[in-house]
Image (spheres, helix red, strand yellow):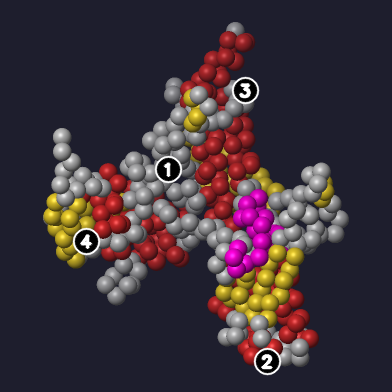
Amino acid sequence: MHLASVVDVEATPEGHVRVLAASTEIGQGTNTIFAQIIADTLGIEYDQVEIAQPDTANVPNSGPTVASRTAMVVGKLVETAALTLKQTLIDAGVLDAGGTGDAFTRACRTYVATHGPLRARSTYSPPPGVQWDDEAYRGDAYGAYAWAVYVAAVSVDTATWETRIDDFVALQEIGRVLHPVLAAGQIEGGVAQAIGYALLEEVVWRDGRMANGQMTNYIMPTSMDLPPIRVFFEERPYVHGPFGAKGIGELPMDGVAPAIANAIAHATGAPVSKIPITPESLMDTIASAEDAHG
Amino acid sequence: MAEPAPRAMRLVVNGRAVNVDAHPMARLLDVLRVDLGLTGTKEGCGEGECGACSVLINGELVNSCLTPVLQADGAAITTIEGVAGADATLSAVQQAFIDHGGAQCGICTPGMIIAATSLLARHPHPTEAEVRNGLSGNLCRCTGYMRIFEAVMKAAAR
């Protein structure tokens, strides 16, 4: 396999647990969910978990922070590495099988003082039944998909052909939701970005180069351009995800523009097939359709 | 035409008078970040479109990337570093951003908080429409704005 992601988890001399992974916190909540996974797996306090700086001089290669894989793939490695760490403490006789909290902290301190550094490693292997051929690039790239339904209510001004989104509902099934605020934040931000994708964000090409690569002339949604974005989750735990979680990052970019295009088509009868659906492109689409039928 | 010489100016930044030697057309953004080490104010676009560089000059909301420092000579400037209380107590807006998940990557957050602070000074009990309008000069790509609106409304209600 070309990439077998690796996560290490170590016990510190103070009795804390440190995660060593290459996944990067960019505000989406990587550090938070890794700490939650460790804390819940080991029965220790959230504040006893440290996340190492993701510098690959010091952390193993957990793969890139992309492809909606951090929670589902790397998070699972965090969980299994933590369980391996715990088993080492049990096998060394410093922790009872059910030991958590202060007992766990003491066990880490005792082990490190007696035996030296304690680090547990988890390396990715595909879940049972998932076949992936890394040479031919064929098979199941993921053990599971996340699912969503997006519904847009729009109003189209038939004089200016501007579209206003009046309401937007986003329903997701991402397995177990690890952190409701972070998960909803991903959806709200993704839906907003996808509204731009649907209605505003036109890349203009000139001689093979982007001609409108400035904020002045590449239009993205402002606070004035968005409807209320109503987010719901239906939880169906995924057996191979950490605490049942699946991925979420790319999901909200997938269905939003189609929902808006369908809503505009439903409102106007226009055979919308291209995004962004700018006022001028919608006007052209409708004029062409009328010419074709005229 | 000769390059303008550096010029001595005096700004009051977050309540403290500071002497600045800079070209009069130097961007206030750069004087704040580089000369004064106040890196909380961010450069998002350098075109006055994104609002990440927002500061208050004599209480007025401006894009510091478009402001020549000469225009700030003698003025009272508030940056994000000046929003919390003297004892580092977070303002109502700052605390509300934490409580309601109003920040993800954080690059828009200083400008958003400055803009929200300015809005609430002018409209202490804004409607959601007034909040959207008041923040319309601040772009955010991560959050989708929903929790930012919630944070500002909740801060206003306190």
In front: label 4 or label 2: 2
Chain designation of label 4: B
Identify the element where label 4 is drawn: strand
Q: From mark 4 to mark 3, how far is it between C-alphas?
A: 56 Å
Identify the element where label 3 is drawn: loop
Q: Which mark is residue B13?
A: 4
Residues at circles 4 and 2 in contact by the CB criterion of under 8 Å: no
Q: Which part of the image, by quadrant, shows the N terminus of chain A?
A: bottom right
Identify the element where label 1 is drawn: loop
Q: Nearer the viewer, residue A291 or A275?
A: A275
Q: Residue at x 60, y 40 (%)?
A: A256
- Residue beneath label 3, please? A271
Residue B92's quadrant in the figure?
A: bottom left
Q: From mark 4 to mark 2, how far is it between C-alphas?
A: 55 Å
Q: Is residue A66 magenta?
A: yes
Residues at circles 1 and 3 in contact by the CB criterion of under 8 Å: no
The image shows residue A61 at horizontal and vertical percentages of: 66, 61
Question: Label 2: few (<14), some or many (≥20) within 10 Å?
Answer: few
Chain designation of label 2: A
Residue A52's quadrant in the figure?
A: bottom right
Question: Label 1: few (<14), some or many (≥20) within 10 Å?
Answer: many
Q: Nearer the viewer, residue A168 or B134?
A: B134
